Amino acid sequence: MGSDHYFTAAPASPENLRTIRVSLAGRELDVTTAGGVFSPDRLDAGTAVLLANMPPVPPGGNLLDLGSGWGPITLSMALASPHATVWAVDVNERALDLVRRNAASLGLTNVNASLPDDVPDDVTFRTIRSNPPIRVGKNELHGMLEHWIPRLDERSDAWLVVQRNLGADSLQRWIAATFQPGYSVFRTTTGKGYRVLKVRRHGTPQTEPITIS
């Protein structure tokens, strides 16, 4: 990949398109990947842990895959919830092109692959599912989560998978300290060196007394 990273906006490395076979949403599928994106040769182990240990996605509304790469989480959600709108958000233009290509090849019309700034400000999400780009650095990662987690609908959850030795436990502590009150964070799964974290946005507390006349 040379000097490119999977979080490079416009990779300069050769595209080198390839087809791989993966299991998503209970189906064996052929998808297109490319150089210059995250995990182009296989379904990443962390993503596989997340997909195997998250609850069913909501049947409708807006769903977010944050840091979509070539789209395994997006495609899984779109296949499972055809009446929902799945937003695949990434800074890597090549990754977004692959999401669009894969969605089209699977006949999925409920996918929006977008740069972060292209998601309308009034869109909120019934769930967020993410294998976040830990290697962008702590400040960038924290800024990303501070932007997107508050866009959860009330009584909705974000599910994040993070490698244990890349700071999963410290990230859990940071989330707990940062998103209070009104949020909670729990570790739901540990497997193959990864943690799955559930971030819950609770309902707005009742601030005015209820008067019964």
Image (tube, rainbow, N blue to C red):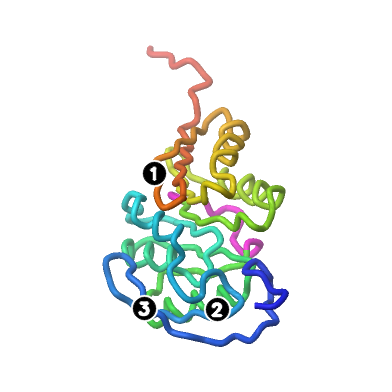
The stretch in magenta equals 116-127
Position of the C terminus by quadrant: top left
Disc on res. 21: 3
Q: Quadrant of residue 60?
A: bottom left
In front: 112, or 164? 164
CA gap between label 3 and label 1 equals 26 Å
Q: Secondary structure at mark 1?
A: strand
- Label 2 belongs to which residue? 97
Mark closest to the chain's N terminus, 3 or 1: 3
Residue located beneath label 1 in the image: 189
Q: Is residue 123 magenta?
A: yes
Percent x, y for residue 146? 63, 45
| Nearer to the camera, 158 or 53 | 53
**Residue 86 location (% of width, % of height):** 45, 63
Q: Of circles 2 and 3, which is in front?
A: 3
**Residue at 56% over, 73% down:** 96
Total tally of numbered discs in the picture: 3
Q: Amino acid at mark 1?
A: Thr
Q: Which mark is residue 22?
A: none
